[in-house]
Every structure is written in structure tokens, then in C-alpha cells.
């Protein structure tokens, strides 16, 4: 219903995910830590992060894995009521033992904290698997 178009610019380039726009409907672990609106801490992880994330995504509701690479996973989360789509990306920096994240709404200006809550829930679930 309100899916919008899949962004063509997502992915990893030189170890960086696409920066958030200025709108308050995106969080990223690669945003400036001084930017409280957009910054969220990366997820500490050692091991096969992408496999763990893929399994987690398949266990969650209304999630589709769009693209996967050895150090990257892209998923789409669809809201239950109106079908809004959020694009979520994970980049695993194996050397640092960190999963960098970016979660952004495709449509609208505000997300009422949904993207931040989602990443914190994923953080909790991935750490519970360990």
C-alpha cells in the first residue's frame, strides 16, 4: 500500500553505509555520535554475523531479505497496518567485531522512533543468541 520505491543507492562503499538524510526517520551506527537523532551504537559481534542476522530476519514477521553478501545484509520491514516499508542494512566489520546498522523509512518524515526501537530489538535478539 505505502511501500514506496526501493532506494537504488543502498549498500556498502569503502566500509560505509549510505548516510541518513536530515529527516528524523533514520538511524545509523555510522552517523556522527554527536547527532543524537540519527546515531545508534553498532552491535558488538564475533562470529558469522551475516548468517546469524539472516536467521533472525527469517524468524521475524513482515521481513524480506533483499540482498546478502559475506559482510552485508539488506532487508525490508513492512508495517502491519498500512504496509509502510523501512530499509534496514547491516554491514559486518569483522576486524572490529561490529555490525554497523542503518534503518530508514522510505516514506514520510517522522517514524515515531520505530527504526531506533527495531535496531535495539535486533541488538537484544542477536545478543540473546550467543
Image (cartoon, helix red, strand yellow):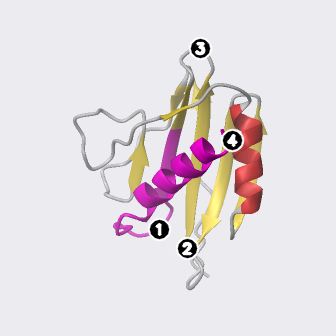
The quadrant in which residue 49 appears is top right
Q: Quadrant of the C terminus?
A: top right
Whether pointer 2 and pointer 4 mark residues with C-beta atoms closer than 8 Å, the reply is no
Q: Is any atom of residue 44 visible in this view?
A: yes
Badge 1 marks a residue whose secondary structure is loop
* Mark 4 burial class by Cα count in 10 Å: few <14, some 14-19, many 20+: many
32 on left or right of 107? left
Q: Residue 107: which numbered mark, if any?
A: 1
**N-term mark: 3 or 4:** 4
**N-term mark: 3 or 2:** 2
- CA separation in Å, label 3 and label 1: 34 Å
- CA separation in Å, label 2 and label 4: 20 Å
Residue 84: image x %, image y %? 55, 73
Q: Is residue 110 magenta?
A: yes
Residue at the spot of label 2: 84
Q: Is residue 64 above or below residue 39?
A: below
Q: Nearer the viewer, mark 3 or mark 4?
A: 3
Q: Residue 6: which numbered mark, if any?
A: none
Whether pointer 2 and pointer 1 mark residues with C-beta atoms closer than 8 Å, the reply is yes
- CA separation in Å, label 2 and label 1: 7 Å
Q: Which residues are magenta?
A: 101-130
36 on left or right of 70? left
- CA separation in Å, label 3 and label 4: 17 Å
**N-term mark: 2 or 4:** 4
Q: Residue 95: which numbered mark, if any?
A: 3
Q: Nearer the viewer, mark 2 or mark 1?
A: 2
Residue at the spot of label 4: 73
Badge 3 marks a residue whose secondary structure is loop
Amino acid at each position: 500500500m505505502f511501500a514506496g520505491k526501493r532506494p537504488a543507492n543502498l549498500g556498502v562503499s569503502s566500509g560505509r553505509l549510505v548516510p541518513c538524510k536530515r529527516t528524523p526517520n533514520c538511524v545509523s551506527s555510522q552517523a556522527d555520535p554527536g547527532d543524537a537523532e540519527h546515531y545508534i551504537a553498532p552491535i558488538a559481534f564475533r562470529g558469522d554475523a551475516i548468517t546469524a542476522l539472516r536467521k533472525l530476519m527469517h524468524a521475524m514477521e513482515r521481513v524480506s531479505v533483499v540482498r546478502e553478501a559475506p559482510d552485508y545484509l539488506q532487508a525490508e520491514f513492512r508495517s502491519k497496518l498500512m504496509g509502510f516499508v523501512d530499509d534496514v542494512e547491516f554491514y559486518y566489520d569483522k576486524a572490529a567485531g561490529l555490525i554497523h546498522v542503518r534503518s530508514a523509512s522510505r516514506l514520510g518524515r517522522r517514524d515515531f522512533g520505530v527504526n531506533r526501537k527495531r535496531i535495539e530489538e535486533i541488538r537484544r535478539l542477536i545478543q540473546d543468541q550467543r
